[in-house]
């Protein structure tokens, strides 16, 4: 268990004037094989924006750029990408479907679904060893946390912080 990290909100104005968290990046080995997985398995909208990259999106303006590096660098599990479904039953269905097609799409490890951090979910690795989490979340995912009174634990003393549950609080 990592040590408790009490944080404090900064009182300084930001150095940079950032408007939007626009994208993240995924490394892929074979652009076509990855595109097939993104479209046929995850249902992502894809466009090829350069000779070595794709832009991916689903349900919003935040995108991922998949860049062909030609080698697997592997993503750590804690750096996973979350994909929300509507119910615990949909999590179970996704798990079963991925088990059935894992060889066809080069899917690596698939961990069994279970309750964690307040949500029912499971993790799996794609053909490029990027980790994904399929989870049951309400509409808008974790965004409502920023609007929920008491959700921000900033400034709690370590002894009070230790008493807090780690989790999304959804469905718990």
Image: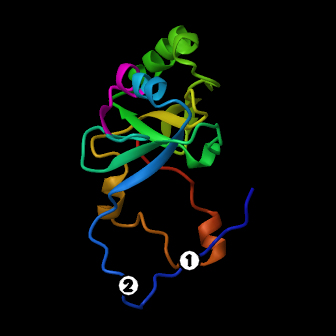
Q: Residue at x 34, y 61 (%)?
A: 21
Q: Secondary structure at mark 2?
A: loop
Viewer-side residue, 87 vs 17: 17
Position of residue 95 measured from the top left corner of the image (x, y, whole percent): 51, 19
Residue farthest to the top, as pictured:
100
Magenta part of the chain: 38-48
Q: Secondary structure at mark 1?
A: loop
- The residue at which mark 1 appears reads as 7
Viewer-side residue, 169 vs 62: 62
Q: Are marks 1 and 2 in contact (CB under 8 Å)?
A: no
Question: What colour scheme was applied to this rendering of the protein?
Answer: rainbow
Position of residue 40 measured from the top left corner of the image (x, y, whole percent): 37, 19
Viewer-side residue, 55 vs 113: 55
10 Å crowding of disc 2: few (<14), some (14-19), many (20+): few
Q: Is residue 172 visible?
A: no
Q: Is residue 47 magenta?
A: yes
Residue farthest to the bottom, as pictured:
12
Position of residue 71 measured from the top left corner of the image (x, y, whole percent): 63, 37
Q: Residue at x 56, y 37 (%)?
A: 131
Q: Nearer the viewer, mark 1 or mark 2?
A: 2
Q: Quarter of the image for the N terminus: give it.
A: bottom right
- The residue at which mark 2 appears reads as 14
How many numbered discs?
Answer: 2
Q: Is residue 90 left or right of residue 114?
A: left
Position of residue 70 measured from the top left corner of the image (x, y, whole percent): 59, 37
Q: Is residue 20 left or right of residue 154?
A: left
Residue 39's disc is: none
Q: CA distance from mark 1 to mark 2?
A: 17 Å
Viewer-side residue, 145 vs 158: 145
């Amino acid at each position: 268990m990592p040590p408790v990290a009490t944080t404090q909100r900064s009182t300084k104005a930001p150095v940079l004037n950032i408007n939007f968290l626009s994208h993240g990046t995924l490394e892929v080995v074979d652009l076509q094989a990855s595109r097939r997985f993104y479209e046929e398995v995850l249902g992502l909208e894809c466009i090829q924006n350069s000779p070595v990259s794709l832009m991916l999106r689903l349900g919003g303006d935040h995108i991922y750029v998949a860049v062909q590096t030609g080698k697997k660098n592997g993503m750590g599990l804690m750096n996973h990408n979350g994909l929300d479904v509507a119910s615990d039953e949909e999590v179970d269905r996704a798990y079963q479907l991925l088990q059935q097609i894992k060889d066809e799409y080069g899917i690596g490890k698939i961990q069994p679904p279970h309750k964690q951090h307040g949500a029912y979910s499971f993790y799996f690795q794609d053909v490029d060893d990027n980790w994904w989490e399929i989870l049951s979340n309400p509409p808008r995912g974790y965004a409502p946390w920023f609007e929920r009174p008491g959700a921000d634990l900033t400034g709690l003393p370590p002894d009070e912080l230790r008493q807090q549950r780690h989790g999304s609080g959804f469905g718990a």
